[in-house]
Image: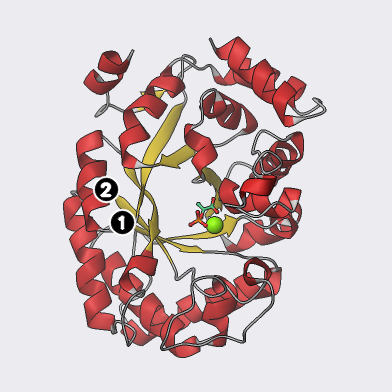
Amino acid sequence: TASAAAAQAHRPARTRDGVQIEVGANLGGLADATAAAAAGADLAGLVRTEFLFLDRDAAPDVDEQVTAYRALADALGGRRLTLRTLDVGGDKPLPYAPVPPGDNPFLGVRGLRFSLLRPDLFAAQLTAIVRVAHETPVSVLFPMVSTVDELRAAREALDDAVRGIGRGIPAGLRVGAMIEVPAAALKASALAPLVDVFSIGTNDLTQYTLAAARGDGGVASLGDPWDPAVLRLVDVVCRAAGERVTVSVCGEFASAPGAASVLVGLGARELSVVPAQVPGVKQAVRETSVADAATLVADLLTRPGAAEARAAATVRSM
Ligand code: PEP
Ligand code: MG
C-alpha cells in the first residue's frame, strides 16, 4: 500500500530473496534533488544537465557548472550523483552552439555526438564534473552512444579532464554509457570494458527499436517498452554486463506497473525514476524475488507482442 511504501521509503530496497536494488531519482534541476532526498532516493541515478545549458545566450563556464553540481550534491546529502553529459542537439538546439541542421533531429547530431563535435564545451563540462567528483561520489554518464569509438573518445576526453586537474582519478568516480540505441545494446559486450555502469534509457531505446518517435501520438501504441524486442535488448545488455558492470534502468519504464520485477529479473540492480515514484518502486522491489522474476522473464521474452508481455507480467505480479 502507499502508506507502507512511504513508511519504508528511506530504507534500502531488498528483494524477498535478499538482493539489494538501488532506487534512484532522475533530476532535471535543483528542486528535483530536494524532492529526491525527501522521497528516500538512494542516489540521483540520472541528472539531465541540459537544464543548465538551455534558454541562455552562452554556455555556463566551469565554475558555474561546479556550483550547480555541488548544489545538487548538497541537496542529496552526499548520495551518489550521476551526471549525464549534455544531451542536446537535434530537437533541442543551443543558440550559442549550432549543429548541422538535419532533416531528422532524433537521428542527427545529439547527445555524445554533439559533445564530440564541440570539444571545448565537452572539456569544460567534464572538468566541472571531475572537480565535483573530488568532493562527493559522482558517476559520469555519456548519452546516445552508438559506437565503441565514440565511447573511447569520450573516455579520452574524461582522462584529459582528470589530467588537467592534476589530482588523480577521484576515488568515487564511475563511468557509464547510456544504452538507448539498439546498436549499443547489441554491442554491449564490446562497450563493457570501457565502463562501470550501463544505464538503459528505455525512452529512447523504445523509440529507436520500434522506429516510433517519442511524443508522436500517431505511433504511441507502437512505441511500447513492453515490446519483447525492447525486453530482449535489455536482456542482451544485462548478459554482456556480467558481474562487474552495473546495469541501471533510467527510462520511464522503470516505474511502470509490473516493470520493476521484470527489470530485476533481467539483471538490473539499479532503477532510477522520477522522485515521486521512488517509494512505490522500492515497494515493488520488496515484493519481488530475483529467482521468480528470472523465471517470469524467460517466458516474457518469447511473447509475440507488448500486450501479451505486459499481461503476463502484471497478472503474475498481482
Ligand atoms: C531515456 O532515453 O530513456 C532517458 C532516460 O533519457 P532522456 O529521456 O533524457 O532522453
Ligand atoms: Mg534518452
The residue tagged 1 is: 137
Q: Nearer the viewer, residue 266 or 215?
A: 215
Whole-Å distance between the Cαs marked 2 and 1?
7 Å
Numbered badge on residue 79: 2
What residue is rendered at 60% in x and 54% in y? 204
> Based on the displayed image, in which of its 4 quarters is residue 124 positioned?
bottom left
Mark 1 CB in 8 Å range of ligand 1? Answer: no
What residue is rendered at 61% in x and 77% in y? 109
Counting from the top left corner in percent of width and height, residue 178 is at 56, 57
* 289 lies left or right of 164: right
Q: Residues within 10 Å of mark 1 (few under 14, many from 20)?
A: some
* 233 lies left or right of 28: right
Where, quadrant-wise, is the N terminus in this rendering? top left
Counting from the top left corner in percent of width and height, residue 121 is at 42, 85
Q: Secondary structure at mark 2?
A: loop
Which color scheme does this rendered protein use? secondary structure
* 74 lies left or right of 241: left
* 156 lies left or right of 239: left
Splitting the image into four quadrants, where does ligand 2 fall? bottom right
Q: Amino acid at mark 1?
A: Pro
Q: Secondary structure at mark 1?
A: loop
Q: Answer whether labels 2 and 1 touch (C-beta < 8 Å).
A: yes
Question: Can residue 78 be seen by looking at this rendering?
Answer: no
Q: Is 78 placed above or below 305 here? A: below
What residue is rendered at 29% in x and 81% in y? 60
What residue is rendered at 39% in x and 68% in y? 50
* Upstream in sequence: badge 2 or badge 1: 2
Q: Nearer the viewer, residue 264 or 301?
A: 301
> Based on the displayed image, in which of its 4 quarters is residue 81 positioned?
bottom left
Numbered badge on residue 116: none
Q: Is 59 placed above or below 309 here? A: below
